[in-house]
Amino acid sequence: MINKKVTIIGAGNVGSTLAYTLASKAICSTIILKDIRENIVEAMSLDISQSANAAKSHTIVKAAKTSKDLEGSDIVVITAGVPRKPGMSRNDLLLTNAKIMESVILEVKENSPDAIVIVVSNPLDAMVYSALKSSGFKKEKVIGMAGVLDSARMSHFILDKLGYGAGQIEALVMGGHGDDMVPLPNHSTVAGICIDNILIKKDIDDIVTKTRNGGLQIVKLLETGSAYYAPAHATSLMVESILNNEKKIYPCSVLLEGEYGYENIVGGVPVMLGSNGIEKIIELDLTDEQKVLFEKSINSVKELTEVLENNFF
């Protein structure tokens, strides 16, 4: 963690929980929190910094006072954006958050052009596309957090169905971060055993459905917000793999340039994360059914990026 700096832009529930997680685990030496609510982010920084001291962590947490505080960031995590409000169409939300993303990413480019960017803002895949086009950064440096979270949700539903295997479950979800995501049961295991061998098809289909609706379920229960503990922890795993050059493989939202047969479109696929950001994109052998589902998911992302192209780029 020596001299590793992480900046988090957007100190809502996900951003603040991520800062707390990184500080508690001493994953980096410095955390900068930036938000338009300056008094709140100042209070958060104090609170999280004090919690880090309680944990005997060496991480220092500070509130950004100016854009210059972004300088020297190894990683910038962007959670900034607005939630969908009553009367707001999906395209309204998309264009509003794309404008926010454009402003934020240009600020990053000006003050910390060598940083690796992790996008958490929604709609996720479209925001990754927006960040790439607005910044001109190489695709290896702009990564969306989606599949790590979706795979964790699938692991939870596998455990819930089995009733055993906690800590031994590895699930994999590809595609866009939305209703058309593609859970992969044949690449999901419990203690190395494929779930196809220990669950009947009806149960697997139920897990797939619950995984796709995992985020919506929490939104409905909360009524006034969305999930943040799992998204924050999922993001912390990506940060840790990059800062420590662990080269771990996680499903992330990235720009595809020929991989899986797609060009100039963002989608969730397994990637190796290291000090250069995306070290490698892993191409799996998908079944014919999975290829169809993946194409459907990619097409859903294309619909959003076409709106962006017609209005921005």
Image (tube, rainbow, N blue to C red):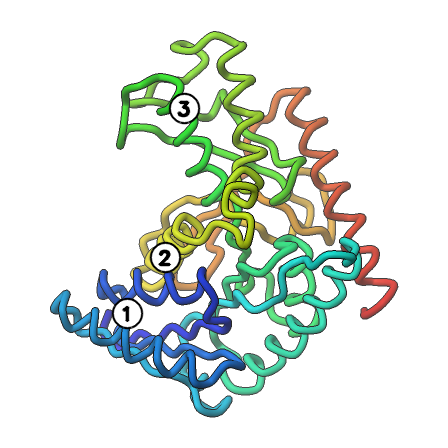
217 lies above or below 303: above
Image coords of residue 292 (percent x, y): 72, 26
Image coords of residue 226 (percent x, y): 52, 51
Which numbered disc, 1 or 3, marks the residue closer to the eye? 3
The amino acid type, in three-letter code, at marker 3 is: Ile
Distance in Å between CA atoms under marks 1 and 3: 32 Å
Tell me what residue is drawn at x 67 percent, y 20 percent.
Answer: 289
Marking on residue 158:
3
79 lies above or below 187: below
- Residue neighbourhood size for the residue with mark 3, other residues' Cα within 10 Å, grouped as few (<14), some (14–19), many (≥20): many
Q: Is residue 90 left or right of residue 228?
A: right
- Residue neighbourhood size for the residue with mark 2, other residues' Cα within 10 Å, grouped as few (<14), some (14–19), many (≥20): many
User: Which is nearer the N-term, disc 3 or disc 2?
Assistant: 3
Which numbered disc, 3 or 2, marks the residue closer to the eye? 3
- The secondary element bearing badge 2 is classed as helix
Image coords of residue 84 (percent x, y): 67, 57
Image coords of residue 1 (percent x, y): 24, 69
Asked whether 134 or 282 is in front, the reply is 134
Determine which quarter of the picture holds residue 98: bottom right
Q: Which residue is mark 1?
A: 28
The amino acid type, in three-letter code, at marker 2 is: Ser
Tell me what residue is drawn at x 53 percent, y 81 percent.
Answer: 36
Q: Which residue is mark 2?
A: 236
Tell me what residue is drawn at x 58 percent, y 61 percent.
Answer: 121
Residue at the right extreme of this rendering: 310
Asked whether 274 or 192 is in front, the reply is 192
Marking on residue 169:
none
The amino acid type, in three-letter code, at marker 1 is: Cys
Q: Is residue 46 left or right of residue 85?
A: left
240 lies above or below 199: below
